[in-house]
Every structure is written in C-alpha cells, then in structure tokens.
Image (spheres, rainbow, N blue to C red):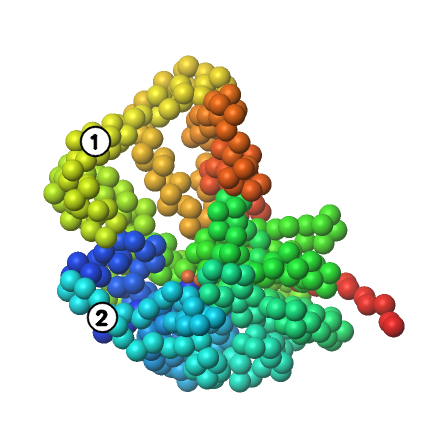
C-alpha cells in the first residue's frame, strides 16, 4: 500500500452568480437556508485553492449536493472548476445527490431550478437525474473498475474506494436496492481477498449524527442503513464518509467486537464551512478537519463575515434587532418571519425577546438546583452571564460539532438541572416523549449530545485502523 492523502468535500451547493440579483427574493431565500448561496462560488474557490496548493494530496472526493437545486448553469460552472483541478493533476471522485437534479415521475424530488430577480423568481433550465451520469462520468466513474447504477468502485494506491449513490427523492428510502447490495458485497469480498482496506463514501448518514435527527427525519438517513451497517461490519469495513445532514460529527457503533465509524462532514458553504483531509498510511486513516480560511478572495470580511451572516449569527442579529429597532427587524426577517403577523404581534414579540435576552445564568442555575446540585455561591458568580449567549454557543456548534459544555462546566449543570426538572413535570403530566420521538425518553436524552460530545469525544479528528482480519470459509 502506498501513502495516500485525499480531501473530502460535502454539500458544496454551488449557486451561480448569474442566477440572482440583489433584492428581496434572494434575501428571502437566503434567510430560510442554512447554506450560503450568494457567496458559495467564493467559498468553493477558497477551498479549491487549498487543493491546488497541496502538492502532497492529489485526490479529492465530493459526496453530493454539488449544486443548489439542479440548475443546468450551476452544473456547467461547477464542472468547469472540477476540470480545472483535473488539469492541475488532481484526481476527482464525485457522487451526485438529491439537490443535483429536478425530479419528475418516480424521481420527483420537488426541486425546481429558478433564478432570482429583484422581487421574484423565474424558471431556468434544469438537469434531470438521467443526465447526471453523462455530466459527471469524467469525474471518477470513467476510472471505475466496477459500477452499479451510479455507484462505483476503484483501487487507488492499494486502497479500495467505494462510492455509493443514494440520491433518493427525499420522501422515500434512498440507497442501494437488493441487486445493489449484492454488487457491494462482492466488492467487499474482493477487496478483502486482495488485501485492500476499504473506504466507503455515500451522501446520507449511515449512523445518525444526533439521536433526535433519525427520530424526526428517518428518510434523511441512508435508506436501509441497518442492512448496510451489518454488511460493513461483517466484512470488516471501519470507515464510511457521509454528508447531507451538514453536521460535522464522528460517531461510532460497535457490536462488542467490531467497530464502524461514520465520519460526517458539514457543508463546505455553511456558517462554519469545513472539509476533511485524510492521510492513509500503513493501513491507518488519519482524519482531520480543514476550516474555511479566514481570508477569502471576494468576501471582504472573510470567514467571520460568513459566520455572522448565516444561521446562528443571523438569528442572533434578528433577536438583537427586534429589541433595538423593530422596523429593521421586519426587514431583516424577510422570508423567515411573516411581516404582517410580526407587525400585528409586535406587542408580544418585542417584550418576550427583550425579557429572554436579559435572563442571566444565575437565574437559570436556580431553576433546576435540586437536580444539578449547584450550590448558592457558585450560582451567584454567574449573574453577569446571559442565557442567550449560552444558547447561541450551542446553536453555533450544532452543525460544526464538538458541543461546547463538558459535564464539569457550570452551563452543563444548569441545563442538566433544568431539563431534569422539566422531565419530572412531564412525567407527572403523563407526557411520554418516546411516543413522539422514537428512542428518546426524556428531554435530557434529547439535549445531552447537543450540550457536550457524547460520541467519540472529538468531531474534528480521529485516527482509525482500517484493516481488520476477515477470513471467509471456503465452500
Ligand atoms: Fe446538502
Ligand atoms: Fe443532501
């Protein structure tokens, strides 16, 4: 086996600059999206520069949702960028996913390719699912040694790369069907017989990033993932790389003997965009995280501007503005908050947000004191800290992983105490959460992975031994 490095990019959601002009329409769309559409070309270019400048890494894997929603122009421009990387000597391996086409008939995925004029939208040419194979064949599948539908398998430097297409329509299970699973199993057996450690890639999560994710959105998982997990563990596969959820986490399952890791990578164009770098050496995968660079050509405020304008940064600005300048709040909330209703209920919304912004951490500490065991002196020390700040730290970490508050911190104890108290109240009222969210029996079970990392302890990096001895009995 050679030493081999590769980069992994998930969910770049490229959106062409030619498909929008400044105005309420693009603002409204941006406010309801967790990804950054307007600046996606600059962000993608910044990451592609990293690829270009890294002479020790010649392989780049992209695992779907390459563009916004199936716009032909976005595919044209995005593939041009991929071709330019190829001309600089990079090997590109691509999977497409649900956002890469506009469905019709059985493939209906509800996406419609549009551009944004000042105050509305207009339809633009789209790509259908059956066209994707031809468009993206030059980016990986043309080198495949074996294929099934748009899934493929190839040997690179003694390692077996298997990329599984799971571009479902978003309503039903996605992923391999029975024949596809048969194909995959043959590939895994062949890899073991040839002594090739396997690296598996697919778009949807195979192990849920947070328990609540699978409980509320089971079709946002890799379809039939229990079958896939069982097969991977049976054949000693240790690492599967996934995207889609935009949540940057590393999670693990074990049957007591074997382990399987799902390395989830956040969207490259999210508030805290990241990619992964993986170094393969002596049968080990050394997996790390590469953040969006601070300086980005074409974005004066760089990564800080991106973080402030999107998701947590945007919601925080919305709350602060509602308290300070309600008319500005109405403008800022376009697309997210119905303007007429927000005007009508100003007398409730503004004081409610004002009160919430003022609640301090000492007050919050008193709420669940009987459960957290916090003493009065400790609680008094935190009267200058605000609950809203803690909430936004948690929100900011939701997608970038490594939830912030370990069990020894004051914040962890405050949340634990408050939720345990709420759980007791729910019990008395005979409210059973597990009836609504499968596998979740309390508010604390739901919240704990968002408060601190209950997975592998670190979502940014891990070193995994890829080779487990697997022997097959001869017939
Ligand atoms: Fe996505
Ligand atoms: Fe997706």
Which quadrant: the C terminus? bottom right
Residue 148 position within the rendered picture, expressed as x and y whole percent measured from the top left: 60, 77
- The residue shown at (39%, 62%) is 268
- The residue shown at (36%, 66%) is 111
Q: Callout 2: helix, strand or loop? A: strand
Q: Which residue is mark 2?
A: 122
C-alpha distance separating marks 2 and 1:
37 Å
Residue 267 position within the rendered picture, expressed as x and y whole percent measured from the top left: 41, 60
Mark 2 Cα-neighbour bin, 10 Å: few <14, some 14–19, many ≥20: few
Q: Which residue is outermost to the top?
A: 376
**15 shown above or below 29:** below
Q: Callout 1: helix, strand or loop? A: helix
Residue 406 visible in rendering? no
Q: Which residue is mark 1?
A: 348
- The residue shown at (52%, 41%) is 437
**82 shown above or below 315:** below
Pointer 1 residue Cβ closer than 8 Å to ligand 1: no
Q: Nearer the viewer, residue 331 or 280?
A: 331
Q: Nearer the viewer, residue 409 or 66?
A: 66
Residue 273 visible in rendering? yes
> Would residue 265 appear left or right of 183 to someone viewing this image?
left
Residue 305 position within the rendered picture, expressed as x and y whole percent measured from the top left: 26, 54
Q: Nearer the viewer, residue 22 or 50?
A: 22
């Amino acid at each position: 086996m050679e030493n081999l490095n590769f980069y992994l990019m998930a969910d770049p959601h490229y959106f062409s600059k030619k498909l929008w002009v400044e105005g309420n329409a693009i603002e409204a769309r941006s406010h309801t999206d967790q990804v950054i559409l307007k600046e996606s070309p600059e962000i993608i270019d910044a990451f592609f520069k990293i690829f270009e400048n890294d002479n020790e890494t010649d392989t780049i894997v992209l695992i779907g949702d390459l563009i916004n929603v199936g716009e032909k122009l976005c595919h044209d421009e995005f593939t041009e960028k991929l071709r330019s990387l190829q001309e600089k000597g990079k090997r590109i391996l691509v999977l497409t996913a649900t956002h890469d086409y506009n469905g019709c008939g059985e493939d209906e995925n509800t996406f419609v390719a549009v551009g944004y004029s000042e105050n509305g939208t207009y339809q633009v040419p789209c790509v259908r699912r059956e066209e994707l194979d031809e468009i993206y064949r030059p980016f990986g599948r043309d080198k495949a040694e074996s294929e099934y539908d748009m899934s493929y398998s190839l040997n690179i430097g003694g390692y077996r790369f298997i990329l599984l297409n799971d571009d479902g329509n978003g309503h039903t299970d996605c992923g391999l069907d029975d024949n596809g699973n048969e194909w995959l199993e043959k590939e895994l057996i062949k890899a073991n017989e040839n002594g090739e450690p396997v690296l598996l890639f697919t778009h949807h999560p195979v192990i849920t990033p947070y328990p609540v994710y699978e409980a509320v959105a089971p079709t946002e998982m890799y379809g039939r993932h229990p079958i896939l997990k069982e097969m991977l563990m049976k054949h000693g596969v240790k690492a599967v790389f996934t995207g889609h959820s935009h949540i940057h986490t590393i999670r693990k399952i074990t049957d007591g003997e074997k382990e399987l890791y799902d390395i989830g990578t956040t969207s490259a164009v999210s508030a805290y965009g990241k990619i992964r770098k993986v170094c393969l050496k002596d049968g080990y995968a050394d997996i790390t995280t590469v953040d969006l660079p601070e300086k980005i050509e074409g974005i004066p405020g760089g990564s800080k501007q991106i973080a402030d304008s999107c998701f947590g940064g945007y919601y925080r600005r919305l709350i602060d503005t509602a308290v300070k300048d309600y008319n500005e709040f109405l403008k800022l909330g376009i697309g997210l908050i119905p303007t007429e209703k927000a005007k009508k209920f100003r007398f409730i919304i503004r004081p409610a947000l004002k009160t919430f912004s003022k609640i301090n951490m000492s007050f919050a500490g008193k709420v669940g004191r009987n459960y957290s065991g916090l003493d009065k002196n400790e609680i008094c020390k935190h009267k200058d800290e605000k609950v809203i700040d803690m909430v936004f730290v948690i929100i900011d970490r939701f997608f970038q992983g490594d939830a912030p508050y370990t069990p020894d911190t004051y914040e962890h104890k405050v949340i634990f105490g408050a939720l345990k108290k709420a759980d007791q109240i729910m019990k008395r009222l005979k409210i059973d959460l597990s009836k609504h969210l499968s596998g979740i029996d309390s508010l604390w079970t739901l919240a704990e992975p968002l408060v601190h990392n209950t997975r592998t302890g670190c979502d940014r990096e891990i070193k995994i031994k890829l080779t487990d001895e697997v022997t097959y009995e001869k017939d």
